[in-house]
Image: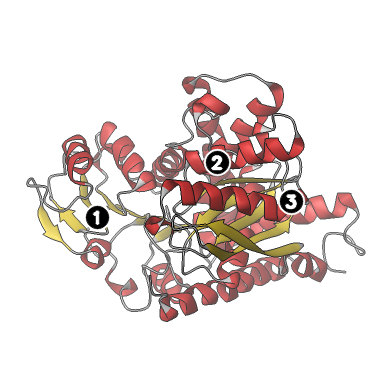
Amino acid sequence: MAVDVEKNKKQDNTLDATLNSIRQAVEMGDLSYEVYEYLKTPMRFVEVGVPVEMQDGRMEVFTGYRCQHNNVFGPYKGGIRFHPAVTIDSIKALSMWMTLKCSLVGVPFGGAKGAIVVDSTKMTIKERERMTRSYVRALGSVLGPETDIPAPDVFTDAQVMAWIADEYSDIMREPSFGVVTGKPLAVGGCVGRNEATGRGCFFIGREAAKALDIPLEDARVAVQGFGNVGSNAAILFAEVGCPVIAVSDVSGGLYNKNGIDIFKLLDHVEKTGFVKGFEDAEEITNEELLTIDCDILIPAALENQINSGNADQVKAKIVIEGANGPTTPEADQVLKDKGILVVPDILANSGGVTVSYFEWVQNNYGFRWDLETVNRRLEEKMTEAFKMVYKYYCEKCVGSDMRTGAYMYSTQRLAEAMHYRGWLSNGTHRK
């Protein structure tokens, strides 16, 4: 697969945007400059060679990364992705977002991210397994249940996590399933983990609608990206009576002003693999979906989808960022000027890491919660986080946006932890 250079440049720019947001949050919060100094650079960045014996017997060496951003709250936590267009800067930015997410929802993790630069879709399952195990061996002592806990990400899944847990357990010579989350239930996974990010988006959307006095049962919803996050969010909105009027995936989009039957669409996707070809809706493009007249827009696909070229055409009242980085800084300003509430990714899609924390706790204590308990505790976490960030945004970010409020709230919590751990020489705030 050819690497998209322009896309890589956009991903690299994401790091600059993230650093600017952190710097702004530190300055607006009157925090010590040392807080920014800690947050601007990962504590550790590891690059490794990942040798893999291919199906034809030849040896191929892939490049692997693990970025450990900050562990002031606890062990590093973050997904591992297999993707050919991975860049060092994109991995750094993603690890920073994880630090901010964990701080925001109050789970005792720091941020991390990992990747192998590879098109794993062209590999056999045995090649993928050998590559995964080789990656774990190459990282050595960098990982651990009390050190760094990976999770699934782009083109990795529960099976990959099981291979990681098994390889790490072999290295440690004892069962160590708590080294990863997002595992199959048979080897210590958590019920509800697969739906957690989409469920979290629903809880956030519900609270945002409540904050703006929009009756949820009448709210028209559009979802870009009908994958794991988008489809689960769509199901939950549909179940409470919201008309989901538009959805899309890589094959294109669908629109029905009266609402799409999400459950029929799921059957169609199960049979065909894509939303394209569903008969009870008209076809639209992914780009057209973003400008649909709706109440709640959920970009749950790729980064940089709402940008300076289309932000002025967005008609939603609320944008819930199901994906990481779907809105560019230029678009943020346009949406703010239009009075659109954007709930940022570090809050909106933090349901995944929250339930990952639940899985880790259960692994450490050797017991399991039922689905009702997991969902109830997720709802409590997400609802509390939204209310705290929204209050912070309304009271301390007048004239700004909710992203700024989220970054400020998160960095304040990080600064407090740094202070008590003795990392700051002059206290939390500037003198």
Q: Residue at x 60, y 71 (%)?
A: 88
Determine whether 386 is above or below 374 in the image: below
Numbered label attached to residue 248: 1
Image x and y of residue 266, in percent: 22, 39
The residue labelled by disc 2 is 161
Query: Does residue 337 appear anywhere in the picture?
Result: yes
Are there few (<14), some (14-19), or many (20+) residues within 10 Å of tag 2?
many
Q: Nearer the viewer, mark 1 or mark 3?
A: 3
Give the SS element for disc 1: strand
Asked if one can make out residue 384 in the rendered structure from this viewpoint, the answer is no
Residue at coordinates 47% horizontally, 21% vertically from top-left? 372
Give me the C-alpha separation between circle 1 and circle 3. 40 Å
Above or below: residue 129 compared with residue 45: above
Image quadrant for the N terminus? bottom left
Residue at the image point whose x is 16% and y is 43% from the top: 260
Q: Observer-nearest residue: 34 or 336?
A: 34
In the image, which is nearer the foreground, mark 2 or mark 1? 2
Callout 3 secondary element: helix
